[in-house]
């Protein structure tokens, strides 16, 4: 066989999201785009803000000598300085440009973090439901993903997290606002988790790092606040991107930010910069770095997603679906009307509605709806959602 056994296994476990997305492309060719209700992938459909387009034109028009040359591997100083200034205000901790590394999206940041922190056999604790590609990021660094269930409302189960931490635990990886549930872990949960990590770090005589994946931080509703892990736990690192906050998913521009109180910070940052280069990312895209530096604090029109959330939640609730209204993101994670979430997703697919089974996020019995779609897609899909629901009962 051309590929090794592990790769074959991982391919068989690969993303349900992508499988359904590809199915949507096939069905669009067969039935026509307007007849397919594709809620499979979190591909933002709200356009980037006008400030982005203006900044992009300015950067593209710059014909200064050397603008397309190599840069420091951590990213342009001016960009990191601009990002650090906003993050200092957002996270309530003073950050300088040396605390920020520009990356190829949040995925690039997480792979770099895992590569630097993990020894072979180290464990990464991850609350579920979650974005299941995290397990591959851990494996890329010869680590092992350990999944810990959240509570019934998808809040952190601090007792379960505490019991799951072992002498092999090196990273606790959280995602808030969460994909697929839209849950924001509240301040009490972050404080409680931080206290547990401090105790466990002393117990096992090794640093346990809290890593937060936050690409949806700016996509929140109803005045909800996303707590800063930097305020509660010193050995913490944040990974994020502009894929959702600015609708730049295809541009692969993100960053990682290191808590200035982190133990052995100079060595850790040196490792992060090193692997940002040698893992093959080399640098975050130069063009996007220059654009981002000009528009810190600007976001997409989140009210557009709030409107879509209301359309979807009101429509599904009137049918009888059970769910927790998401605090943030553009995902809804309803309970399947039947126990077999994969079977129910196939029932929706027969109505040309594409969703993702909860099994693909480590949480069977539910399914994910990405509502970053046209309003008409939501409205026109309701008949099919109702038919599948009635059939399920």
Image (spheres, rainbow, N blue to C red):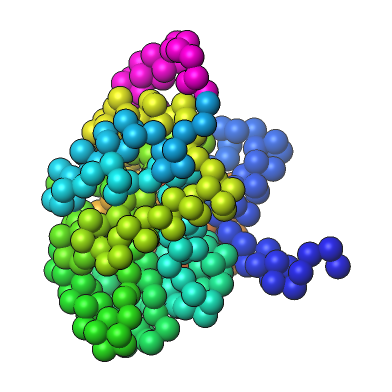
Image height of 275 relative to 42, above or below: below
Q: Quadrant of residue 83?
A: top left
Q: Quick one: 116 or 266, which is closer to the camera?
A: 266
Specify whether 351 is left or right of 47: right
Give the residues drawn in magenta, as a range.
46-68
Residue drawn at point x = 16 percent, y = 65 percent: 232
Residue drawn at point x = 29 percent, y = 27 percent: 295
Q: Is any atom of residue 73 visible in this view?
A: yes
Query: Does the stretch in magenta take in 376?
Result: no
Where residue 353 appears, as percent x and y from the top left, is 54, 48
Residue drawn at point x = 46 percent, y = 42 percent: 73
Residue drawn at point x = 53 percent, y = 77 percent: 120
Where residue 213 appears, as percent x and y from the top left, is 36, 56
Image height of 277 relative to 11, above or below: above
Image height of 170 relative to 114, above or below: below
Where residue 48 appears, as percent x and y from the top left, is 38, 27
């Amino acid at each position: 066989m051309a590929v090794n056994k592990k790769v074959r296994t991982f391919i068989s476990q690969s993303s349900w999201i992508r499988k359904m997305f590809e199915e949507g492309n096939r069905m669009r060719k067969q039935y026509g785009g307007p007849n397919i209700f594709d809620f499979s992938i979190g591909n933002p459909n709200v356009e980037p803000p006008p400030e982005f387009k203006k900044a992009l034109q300015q950067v593209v028009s710059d014909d200064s000598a050397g603008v397309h040359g190599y840069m420091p591997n951590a990213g342009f100083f001016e960009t990191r300085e601009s990002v650090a200034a906003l993050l200092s205000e957002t996270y309530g901790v003073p950050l300088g440009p040396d605390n920020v590394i520009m990356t190829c999206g949040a995925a690039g940041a997480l792979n770099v973090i895992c590569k630097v922190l993990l020894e072979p056999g180290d464990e990464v604790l991850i609350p579920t439901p979650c974005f299941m590609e995290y397990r591959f990021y851990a494996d890329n660094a010869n680590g092992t993903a350990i999944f810990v269930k959240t509570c019934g409302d998808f809040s952190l189960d601090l007792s379960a997290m505490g019991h799951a931490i072992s002498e092999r635990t090196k990273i606790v990886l959280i995602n808030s606002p969460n994909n697929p549930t839209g849950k924001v872990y509240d301040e009490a949960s972050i404080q409680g988790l931080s206290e547990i990590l401090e105790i466990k770090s002393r117990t096992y005589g090794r640093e346990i790092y809290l890593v937060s994946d936050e690409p949806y931080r700016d996509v929140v509703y109803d005045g909800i606040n996303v707590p800063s892990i930097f305020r509660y736990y010193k050995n913490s690192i944040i990974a994020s991107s502009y894929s959702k906050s600015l609708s730049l998913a295809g541009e692969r521009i993100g960053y990682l930010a290191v808590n200035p109180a982190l133990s052995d910070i100079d060595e850790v940052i040196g490792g992060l910069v090193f692997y940002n280069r040698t893992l093959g990312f080399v640098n975050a895209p130069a063009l996007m770095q220059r654009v981002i530096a000009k528009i810190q604090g600007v976001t997409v029109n989140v009210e557009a997603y709030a409107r879509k959330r209301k359309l979807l939640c009101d429509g599904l609730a009137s049918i009888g679906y059970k769910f927790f209204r998401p605090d943030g993101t553009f995902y809804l994670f309803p309970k399947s009307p039947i126990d077999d979430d994969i079977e129910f997703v196939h029932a929706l697919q027969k109505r040309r509605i594409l969703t993702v089974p909860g099994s693909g996020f480590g949480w069977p019995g539910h399914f994910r709806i990405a509502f970053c779609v046209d309003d008409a897609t939501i409205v026109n899909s309701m008949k099919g959602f109702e038919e599948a629901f009635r059939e399920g009962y």
